[in-house]
């Protein structure tokens, strides 16, 4: 399957970055790009968040040791092979990838981050990757086409590239945020196989502060996302700020814009779930805390019965309410109500009258199904993204090695 390639908007390119996306031969396909390289022309303040799976890929081990940092210069990403569950050899391969990239760029190995995505438990074809690094360093550029190719090169089972961007102004100067991601299956980040990279030319001086901002941002975006409830070994989100624009936005505005691009990407990943026909948006309101609201939303999102009901356009609210009930979050059924696509189906712990046939038609016709659940009068809520579960997901994952 050839993914849909969405061109990157040239008006949102951050200054001081170069990148490329090439085919080096990791994937069998003769046309699929499978190696991306992102380079900052000056030291970039960098932060990352990573999978909480106890089994982690070698690149995650490497990146955890290197960020947060004030002087990252590059991120190398390969697709088609996860370099996960590959033992000491995998760790050596990840380090070698970073070292070779550093030699080619004229920086220290510790200034290079590495990410991988693809098949688990297979040794990386290192010679192929090293040849790809040689090629990639020769093809770096700063045009929209270079960014578009890089967004393509990180994909695995995705049906489309995923890009989001924002611009900011401060002190008479402007800066930009450009973010790309991949993910369609094995998605249930708890910081699947999910990768996201954020690049900004805004001025940021403190990597520890940047790491905290990224943690909060990821917690309310990528950690509110689930396709199949499977947390990957490779989940990584990396953020680089190189200050090349000399624009220093206020902290609140920068965090807001980072949140917007991450939310857009999280939604895009859910919508592109393997075999999915419907994007499922879950809004939980009235909870005692954000954590409670998210626990309820995640239980609903991960329920196979809810997911199949959405696929079948069945407004089976009982499955949704019962999933909320086993989430472990406290709430009172007597103050709980549920809407499906703005139709009230359950009010204060009792069934509500509605036209089941009409609602089913709406669900079937809509690409997006919204489940809104109020669980009381508490101050907290959560927005969560998921998708339905189809026969295509089962067929795909029965035949595709992950």
Image: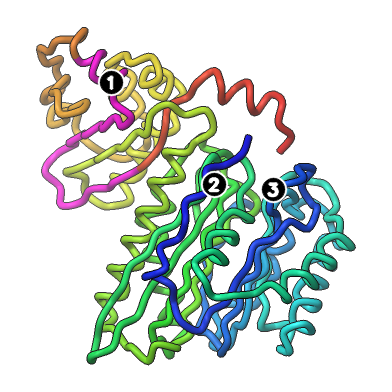
Taking depth in this image into account, of 15 and 113 the one nearest to the observer is 15
Q: Residue under circle 1?
A: 363
Q: Residues within 10 Å of mark 3 (few under 14, many from 20)?
A: many
Give the residue displayed 49% in from the left and 66% down from the top: 144
Q: Which quadrant, please, contains the N terminus?
A: top right
Give the residue displayed 57% in from the left and 82% down from the top: 40
The mark found on residue 183 in the picture is 2
Give the residue displayed 32% in from the left and 40% down from the top: 329
Please report contact status of discs 2 and 1: CB closer than 8 Å, yes or no: no
Left or right placement of residue 84 versus residue 262 in this view: right
| Secondary structure of residue under mark 2 | loop
Answer whether residue 369 is magenta in the image: yes
| Secondary structure of residue under mark 1 | helix
Q: Residue 158, how many percent across, how many down?
A: 56, 42
Taking depth in this image into account, of 147 and 259 the one nearest to the observer is 147
Q: Residue 385, how many percent across, how many down?
A: 37, 41
Give the residues drawn in magenta, as a range. Answer: 359-384
Which image quarter: residue 66?
bottom right
Q: Residue 14, how many percent across, how many down?
A: 44, 77
| Farthest-out residue, top | 357
- N-term mark: 3 or 1: 3
Which image quarter: residue 281?
top left
Q: Residues within 10 Å of mark 2 (few under 14, many from 20)?
A: many
- N-term mark: 3 or 2: 3
Give the residue displayed 29% in from the left and 46% down from the top: 383
> Vertically, is 210 above or below 29?
below
Q: Residue under circle 3?
A: 32
């Amino acid at each position: 399957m050839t993914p849909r390639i969405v061109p990157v908007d040239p008006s949102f390119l951050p200054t001081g970055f170069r990148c490329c996306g090439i085919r080096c031969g990791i994937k069998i396909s003769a046309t699929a790009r499978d190696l991306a390289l992102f380079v900052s022309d000056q030291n970039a303040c960098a932060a990352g968040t990573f999978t909480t799976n106890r089994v982690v890929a070698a690149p995650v081990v490497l990146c955890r040791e290197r960020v947060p940092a004030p002087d990252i210069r590059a991120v190398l990403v390969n697709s088609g092979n996860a370099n996960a569950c590959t033992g000491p050899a995998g760790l050596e391969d990840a380090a070698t990838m970073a070292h070779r990239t550093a030699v080619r760029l004229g920086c220290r190995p510790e200034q290079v981050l590495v990410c991988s995505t693809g098949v688990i438990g297979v040794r990386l074809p290192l010679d192929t990757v090293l040849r790809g690094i040689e090629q990639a360093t020769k093809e770096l550029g700063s045009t929209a086409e270079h960014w578009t190719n890089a967004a393509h090169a990180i994909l695995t089972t995705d049906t489309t590239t995923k890009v989001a961007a924002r611009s900011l102004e401060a002190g008479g100067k402007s800066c930009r945020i450009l973010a790309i991601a991949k993910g369609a299956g094995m998605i249930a980040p708890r910081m699947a196989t999910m990768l996201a990279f954020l690049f900004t030319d805004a001025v940021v001086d403190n990597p520890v502060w940047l790491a905290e901002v990224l943690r909060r941002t990821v917690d309310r975006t990528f950690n509110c996302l689930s396709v199949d409830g499977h947390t990957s070994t490779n989940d990584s989100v990396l953020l680089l700020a190189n200050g090349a624009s000399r624009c220093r936005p206020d902290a609140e505005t920068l965090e807001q814009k980072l949140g917007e691009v991450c939310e857009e990407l999280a939604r895009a990943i859910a919508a592109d779930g393997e075999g999915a026909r419907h994007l499922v948006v879950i809004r939980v309101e009235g909870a005692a805390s954000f954590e409670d609201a998210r626990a309820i939303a995640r239980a609903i999102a991960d329920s196979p019965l809810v997911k199949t009901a959405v696929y079948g356009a069945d407004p089976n609210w009982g499955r949704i309410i019962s999933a909320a009930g086993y989430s472990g979050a406290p709430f009172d059924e007597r103050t709980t109500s549920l809407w499906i696509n703005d139709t009230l189906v359950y009010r204060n712990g009792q069934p509500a009258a509605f036209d089941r046939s009409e609602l089913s038609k709406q669900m079937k016709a809509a690409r997006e199904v919204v489940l809104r659940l109020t669980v009381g009068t508490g101050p907290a809520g959560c927005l969560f993204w998921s998708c339905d579960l189809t026969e295509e997901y089962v067929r795909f994952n029965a035949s595709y090695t992950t």
